[in-house]
Image (cartoon, helix red, strand yellow):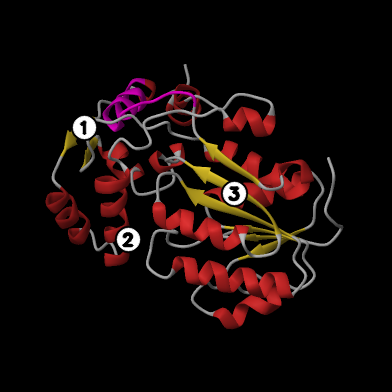
Amino acid sequence: MKTQSAKDILVLGSTGKTGSRVAAGLQQLGYPVRMGSRKADIPFEWNDPNTWPAVVQNTPAVYITFQPDLSVPGADEAIAAFAQVAVAAGVEKLVLLSGRGEPEAQRCEEMVIQSGADWTIVRASWFMQNFTESHLLEPVQAGFVALPVQAVGEPFIDADDIAAVAIAALTDDKHSQQIYEVTGPRLLTFEEAVQEIAAASGNPIHYQQISIEAYTAQLESYGVPQEYISLLGYLFTQVMDGRNASVTHDVERALGRKAKDFSEFVQQAFSVPA
């Protein structure tokens, strides 16, 4: 493995699903890490460009995750502006977490590709961990999951696999100028995924397809911020239209091993000890 430098590798979103895993994985390999979050020693906020110059000083590489999502208006402008600041400060490598099947995210990818820095794009499908660390956990635990998504297959990807690809890209030049479209090895509908969770946990979970209007009303009743409601609506009604109903082998291409299957993830996360 070829290290970029002994300087800190900056991980934006270091408290998030993939960022926390990237930071921990780099540290386990002995790489110094600079946490990129609003509560870090050197604070970082996407909404405050004044925090950007300090956090990119003396770092050779940056893992970029954007909140809330690359599909929101203005994300491409923010990514372009951040990349310009980073490159001016001497950052050599940018690794961007992107979304599969999102035209808006691909515009953000282009901002990184054209930045002048070395780059790798990690374009991910739907996270398995959305069932355990995000908005789907509470419905799963309650035994009733209602979503406005068609019966289309999704190749759910393990966040650990995403992080492993990102770590490889940050630490080895052989991943330069690569777009890795990472997926799990198998297509499942959301209903099939929920039923696998139910079987592993031993708890019945009812799945129901509902309208986007009913879903929006449900989220509003729970006090979910409107920005997040709009994002979920976009993902469920547009991105989940079948465009991503295919698997790739890019995890294996990047890492030399197969991606984790959803059943393995479910057994680890939900199975009841004997």
Callout 1: helix, strand or loop? strand
Query: Which amino acid, by three-letter code, is at mark 2?
Result: Tyr
Q: What's the residue type where badge 1 is placed?
A: Tyr
Does label 2 or label 3 sit earlier along the sequence? 3
Residue carrying label 3: 121
Q: Is residue 189 magenta?
A: yes
Q: Residue at x 53, y 54 (%)?
A: 16
Q: Residue at x 65, y 24 (%)?
A: 257
Circle 1 sits on which residue?
Answer: 207
Task: Using a 10 Å C-alpha cutoff, classify the residue at mark 1 as few (fewer than 14 neighbours), some (14 to 19) or many (20 or more).
Answer: some
Magenta stretch: dominant secondary structure = helix
**Front position in the image: 92 or 8:** 92
The local secondary structure at tag 3 comes to: strand
- Residue 28: x and y in percent read 76, 44
Q: Is residue 225 shown left or right of residue 97?
A: left
Circle 3 packing at 10 Å, graded few (<14), some (14-19), many (20+), is many
Horizontally, residue 88 falls left or right of residue 251, namely right
Residue 5 on image: x %, y %: 85, 57
Which percent across, then down, holds residue 105?
A: 45, 55
Q: Of 217 and 267, which appears nearest the observer?
A: 217
Closer to the camera: disc 3 or disc 1?
Answer: 3
Number of numbered callouts drawn: 3
